[in-house]
Image: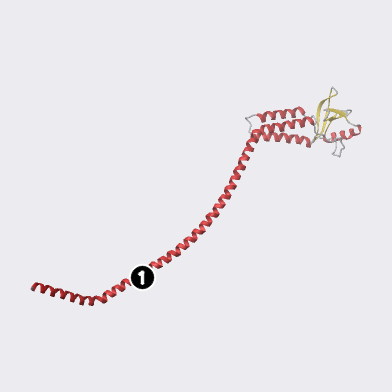
Amino acid sequence: MKKIALSLGLLIFMIFTEGIFAKENLPEKVLNTQKKIYKNKNKLYSAKEEWDEEKIQLKEDFLRLGESLTELRQQTKTLEYKKEIVKKEIEELKLSDAAFKKLENSLEELLFDSLEKLRKLILFYQPYFLKERLDRIQHLKEFVLSKDNSDSEKIRRVIEAYKIEADFARFADVTDVDVEIDGKELSGQLLRIGNLAEFFITPDQGYIAKYNNLTKKYEPVDKRYIEEIVKASEILNGKRIPALCTLPVGSIKLP
């Protein structure tokens, strides 16, 4: 009984003292609670500020992404446009390449045809150095058909041949020649006025003839032109000062 009573007394004492101590520690607990609340509020405010800053940053990022997207769309349109241009250029290059290959393949044929046309022109006009000119054309034809010669050199040679013939047409000169007229070979001078006319004059000036491109023969000229033809010959030979001459050059009809 004594032990039970002692235990009850001890228990009552502990309860009583705990209440006293609890009352004594109440302000400290309230203070600690207020501190915790304040601390938690500060955390909330800090979190809210961080969230607000993050929202602003997110908005700015969103706007930048929108601008980048617009720029990318514009670049895509530009690239598509350039793509179409490049496709067209490729097609044009293909066509150009095909045309170049066609031209390259037919270059020899084109040059050969050009020389043949030049040969016909030489035959149509006066027979001035006819053999030499025709031999040059024949040599050029062989040169053009040869695979050993470059295309650029072939073109240059053909252009040069045309230039030589053009020079024949531009200038007048007098040359000593032997020509066959009516089955007889006569010696004399050949007065060539470009590609307009060609006259044959014997040394005694007793026979003067004009070459007819159509009949391919020398035909006597009208007596009224003899003096002018002789004058032109002497001017070119340096025996007379330059003067105006009236010659029967006429017009040339191409075949």
Residue 121 is situated, as x and y percent measured from the top left of the image, at 77, 32
Residue 57 shown left or right of residue 12 in the figure: right
Residue at position x 74%, y 34% in the image: 164
Residue 192 is situated, as x and y percent measured from the top left of the image, at 81, 33
Q: Quadrant of the N terminus?
A: bottom left
Q: Quadrant of the C terminus?
A: top right
Residue 37 shown left or right of residue 209 in the figure: left
Residue at position x 81%, y 29% in the image: 176
Q: What amino acid does circle 1 point to?
A: Asn
Rendered position, 96 above or below 179: below
Q: Which of 250/10 is in front?
A: 10
Q: Secondary structure at mark 1?
A: helix
Q: Which of 18/83 is in front?
A: 18
Query: Residue lying furthest right in this view?
Result: 224
Query: Residue lying furthest front in this view?
Result: 1
What is the quadrant of residue 38 in the picture? bottom left
Residue 217 is situated, as x and y percent measured from the top left of the image, at 84, 27
What is the quadrant of residue 201 in the picture? top right
Q: How is the image coloured?
A: secondary structure
Residue 128 visible: no
What is the quadrant of residue 240 in the picture? top right
Q: Name the residue that disc number 1 marks.
A: 42
